[in-house]
Amino acid sequence: MLSLNAMNVLQPIGRIFLAFLATVGRLSMFTGSALSHCVRPPFYPRIIGRQMVEIGFFSLPVVGLTAIFAGMVLALQSYTGFARFSAEGAIANVVVLSITRELGPVLAGLMVAGRVGAAMAAEIGTMRVTEQIDALTTLSTNPMKYLVAPRLIAGLTMMPILVFIADIIGVFGGYVVGVYKLGFNAANYLQRTYDFLEAEDVISGLVKASVFGFIITLMGCYHGYHSKGGAQGVGTATTYAVVSASILILSSDYILTELFFAK
Amino acid sequence: MSDARPKIRLRNLHKSFGDKVVLNGVDLDVGVGESVVVIGGSGTGKSVMIKCILALLPVSGGSIQVDGEEVVGIGSKDRERINRKFGMLFQGSALFDSLPVWENVAFGLLAEKRVSRSEARDVAVGKLAQVGLTPEVGDLSPAELSGGMQKRVALARAIAADPEIIFFDEPTTGLDPIMADVINDLIVKITREMGATALSITHDLASARKIAHRIAMLYEGKIIWVGPTADIDDSGNPYVDQFIHGRAVGPIKMAIRA
């Protein structure tokens, strides 16, 4: 009787574990296949271009707004803290380091995951359930090449550019609050921003951005590609795409930070 | 028809999803220039059979020959070459809604880079005319078309690359009887003009009678009857009789639960 109860507990654990392994395996194969299609012709420059505009240009407003408010809040909050031990002068450094190393890539990544990752999963998922992906195959077109590779390429290349712009806007947000609200000298603030910034701070952030761009588009494509069962399946795929991309962004962010930290 | 090498030959074709056996040893020949319609109830694996031939689904076992060439387990280069012989009309039309109608029709040609964009456009207009659509339709988006027109565009797309073999997946499903008959006429006309081989699946018997030279019935993963279209009414097979008369009572038991 006891062993039967034990079985009842262990069975679902085993089932979940096996399902997890199957998903990891499927995702690895999908990633490998997608990457190999990114570097082998034929390429689809028109589609790559369209995806670049979609990811890079049309995400600018939402990412810009996120960055400017993040920079402003950062300046205000760090003033509250730093004023307690008379270190207000360090605010410019705190803002620029936090934005370039951390908040720029992560916040932009999360916003783009919500905007672009969801749209990709919904679009590719709908193509899956309406047999459009099958139709591609019958028309001498590899769907991995036509749908997935252009999105991955666009994600990898556009996210760093997007984050670089977000960095500038974020620092500007901190500057606005620092100068007009907290009464810093404008030249002084900019000088401190510039003096303590190293190339590595910005570059590490842009590398993160590229990785996040890859994660977002990969999750959007993967979940869309494997969606099934009509409208509900597409909805589930969209949710999974955003949730898994967000979690992977935050966890890979730690790993990447640790790698850069170790140097 | 049987002495010549068939265009498509299926032997002992098996397909299962996990524990669920869908195709359980399908044997079927489709002769050159012949139109074969496979009938059968919903969920008997008709679509799965076609998708196995197109390699959209991997088969679990058995043999598929196209022009005498075994195509199960061939490499991707060979597969591309074989798939170039195929055209497919999907059940829901499966038009790409991000592209205008003419690009949908010319998609296969553009993908193979056999023609320039302006040539592809001319071909598309010609194919649209073949299915009774005016050139102006080419500039619309698929979402602006009615179901019947979408079906025609999908048909134009299926024949755009002049395939040797065309698959029709439930070509009349979701259309009113008149539009269904228009599509049937188009299928007969076009396959005859092109001299193409056709393999269709449907549960619409009016459509099957119209487009088929031979009819085969798929039941529980096997072809249980195959014969000329004229013989469908006295097949002497109780399963076929029940199906064509649409009787709820008979040897076929509808599975209420899968």
Image: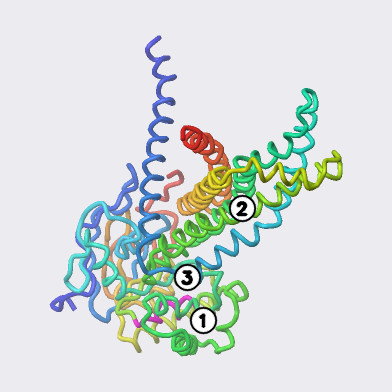
- Can I make out residue B230 in this image? no
Q: Using the image, determine if residue A166 lies above or below residue B74.
A: above
Q: Nearer the viewer, mark 3 or mark 1?
A: 3
Could you classify mark 3 by the number of other residues whose Cα lies within 10 Å: few (under 14), some (14-19), or many (20 or more)? few
Nearest the viewer among A133 and A62 is: A62
Question: SS of the residue at dot 3?
Answer: helix
Q: Is residue A150 magenta?
A: no
Looking at the rendered structure, which numbered label has been put on residue A45?
3
Sequence-wise, the earlier of marks 2 and 3 is 3
- Can I make out residue A13 in this image? yes
Q: Which residue is mark 2?
A: A164
Quadrant (top left/top right/bottom left/bottom right) for the C terminus of chain B: top left
Query: Which span is picked out in magenta?
Result: B153-162
Where's residue A186, x and y in %? 80, 47
Looking at the rendered structure, which numbered label has been put on residue A85?
none
Quadrant (top left/top right/bottom left/bottom right) for the N terminus of chain B: bottom left
Q: Are marks 2 and 3 in contact (CB under 8 Å)?
A: no
Q: Residue at x 60, y 80 (%)?
A: B140
Q: Residue at x 65, y 55 (%)?
A: A165
Q: Amino acid at mark 2?
A: Phe
User: Residues under labels 2 and 1: Cα distance?
Assistant: 40 Å
What chain does badge 1 belong to?
Answer: B
Looking at the rendered structure, which numbered label has been put on residue B102?
1
What chain does badge 2 belong to?
Answer: A
Where's residue B254, x and y in %? 42, 50
Q: Using the image, determine if residue B255 lies above or below residue A252.
A: below
